[in-house]
Image: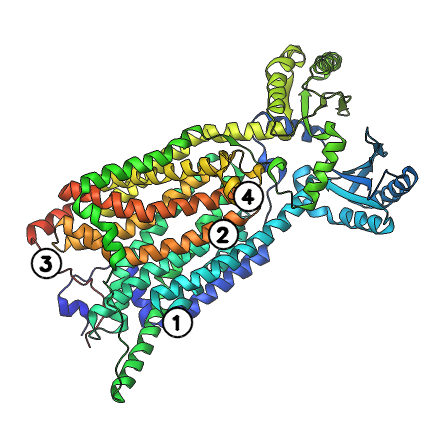
Amino acid sequence: MTLTKELGTVEKQPITVRVANWSALHPGRAIAGWFVFVALCLAVGIGLGTRNATAQDFQVGESGRAEAIATDAGVLERPSEQIMITSKAGPLDEAKAADAARDITARMRKLPQVLDVAAPVRSENGDMLRVEVTMKGVKREVKAFVDPLLEQTAQVRAAHPDLRVEETGDASVSKGLDSQRSSDLATSELISFPVTLVTLFLVFGSLIMIGVPLLLALTSIAGAFGLYMAASHLLPDTGVGMNVILLIGMAVGVDYTLFYLKREREERERAAGRLSPEAVVGIAAATSGRAITVSGLAVIISTATLFLATDVIFSSLAVGTIVVVLAAMISSVTVLPALLVRIGHRQDRRAARAADTGGKPRRRRPAQETGRLWSALLRPARSHPVATLVVSVLVMAGLALPALGMELRVLNKDTHSREIPEMKTYDRLNDAFPDLLAEHWVVVRVDAGRRDELRAALADLTKTVRSDPAFSRKEPELRTSADGRVSVLNLSVPHRLSAQETKDSLRHLREDYLPATVGRVEGADYGVDGTSAQDADYLAHQNAKLPLVVGFLLLLTFLLTALVFGSVVLGLLGVLLNLLSVAAAFGLLVVFFQWGLASALFGFDESATSAIGSRVPLFLFVILFGLSMDYQVFVVSRIREAALGGVPTRKAVLDGIESSAKVVTSAAVVMVTVFSSFVLLHLAEMKQIGFSLAVAVLLDAFVIRVMILPSAMILLGDASWWPSRAMRRARRSAPERPVPVPGNPVARLR
């Protein structure tokens, strides 16, 4: 006899229940199918490979337009590596340094990746000899071809043991950055993995139950890697997608599995052996399975708003997040029911054997038991909802206040960790040759008949900037296309990329000097390119897109919440609570990183704490909204479930939060552990993202969902559900009744 027939429930079922039913009835096929799916994803991804973003994919604003003009004309600034020769002790021996310079020059000229090797240049103090090696290709794409140059530099270093021979440049720095990032991620996994194990053991007390969340999280990440590689052929990889998959994958993978497992154990305890494992899994599918699906879709939909930024980096972040959340969601509602059925039958057999031999079955802690901690935490909302709501909101608002002074900047070489050897070399190079710190590349295109006017205008521009102390004394370098229509003038600035002096020189160049010189040439198409210009244009482009992304995110969050719960009130409440959580996290981000508290407390490099990375707030805003929906959907689903069963709203709120308290805490601990481990990384943006995510999850789990949400819903009462028809029908049919068991065609009474 099926449970559906026994209870007289309606046969129509949501897709989560139908999928769980099939998985429960065919556990072997479901488990094998999942591993085949993961293997296929990896095989396809590895077979296709990863398509990396090209220079054109990064072009935005005036600098992007200028770069495109220079590229088409063949006069784009070529990538270069700088070889530095210094003494290990004492003054530099000129003869030995010259010999090493000849050696490196001869070696580099033989490499197919090298376009030219310049004559050695001595620093003003005479302590360094510099050899510039110009590579073929464009700056953003030569990282993959720099290894032969690094090998030759290493051989020259070995051949001249009395000298220090070092190499730095955009390509070698990017290579070192990638190596450090890989090492950091390995360190992060070593930290988060054991803490996750301990957390799961405290929740379930079973090695088998520990293995299930980790297995699904790791296989979801593996499948997401393959999907991401395949997706890169539509939206290219910028080098950050895999990091995001690891960051988000472990957190949501364990999170979703915990939600499902907790409900399955509750139903198993409630059934007291009267329902089969298939029936118990079906009930969990109709409740937590639905919540997981909604939560996963919420994260995916919110993350998809990053595509509105029309930025290749945000698109890469979005794709990485979407594929790993999708994989985690699919695994939780497909293969997880099959695993739980297998585990359930195994536990039943053990119990039967214990009964046959006269032994006592293992006693478990009641599933609904919450503990003194959560009872104490909920006491303010239960006893004094108005005061609790006001005080909690004021505290969160106070934490958010510093966010009003947030300063954004594009994190560049100035913020890279100095533990990267190439960055130490970069600093020594700039100390010896300050003219190499920053450059502005003025790109101008004119009609063929205006070439003479262009030359005269560029001469005037050169004279103008030479009189400005913000620019260096170095003679500007001029490159002109074969037809004479396009010219690039390199102007050096003796200040770091992020220095205010560099930004001011760019502003003067764009707003004053260019309009007064090349701007007077009729029909001239001009712009300023270079690292500083690219950073400024990127930040301006992002800020211009911010209102669009945030507006769509708020609208979609409201619509999704209102649709899922049938309540406009809950939709508005969900948006407000998410905004409060995100704002508080941003405020703490400013205090710790922009104000430098993290440097004082944890010894972080000041380069990582002087400003907030330009991509951090928008990425965090989107991701935090999605992750906050996890708790919102899961907790409110439990409250709504009780309310639909006739339980008064006040009691439904408290019971729903208490019944989900342990799993919310456990999920929060796992998430915080994973995110906090990224604070230990060297990359400044990852530090800031990891810190903000960890803080936001803590605030969301222990303040928003325990203090503010219950207080607000208790005060709103039945108005919380407006205009839900289902809730009105439930209220009319019975003031209070047991919660019905969802229909499940494979369920059966024992």
Q: What residue type is labelled 1?
A: Ile
User: Which numbered disc flags the more N-terminal residue, 1 or 3?
Assistant: 1
Q: Name the residue under label 1.
A: 208
User: Which numbered disc flags the more N-terminal residue, 2 or 3?
Assistant: 2
Pair 4/1: label in front: 4
Pair 4/3: label in front: 4
Residue 454 lies in quadrant: top right
User: Which numbered disc flags the more N-terminal residue, 4 or 3?
Assistant: 4
Q: Mark 3 points at which residue?
A: 737
> Which residue occupies the extreme bottom position in the image?
357
User: What residue lies at 86% left-to-right and 34% top-to-bottom?
Assistant: 119
Instruction: Quote the CA–CA distance across marks 4 and 3.
Output: 58 Å
20 relative to 313 in the view: left or right: left
Q: Name the residue under label 4.
A: 603
Q: How many labels does the image show?
A: 4
Residue 265, can we see it?
yes
Instruction: Sort mark 3 into few (<14), some (14-19) or many (20+) by Cα contacts within 10 Å.
Output: some
Protein image colouring: rainbow
Element at label 3: loop
Q: Mark 2 points at which residue?
A: 677
Q: Is residue 617 above or below residue 477?
A: below
Instruction: Quote the CA–CA distance across marks 4 and 1.
Output: 40 Å
Element at label 2: helix
Residue 567, can we see it?
no
Assign the C terminus to one quadrant of the image. bottom left
Marks 4/3 in contact by CB < 8 Å: the verdict is: no
User: What residue lies at 15% left-to-right and 63% top-to-bottom?
Assistant: 9
Pair 2/1: label in front: 2
Q: Which amino acid does label 4 sit on?
A: Gly
Q: Where is residue 569 in the image (x, y as percent from the top left)?
A: 21, 39
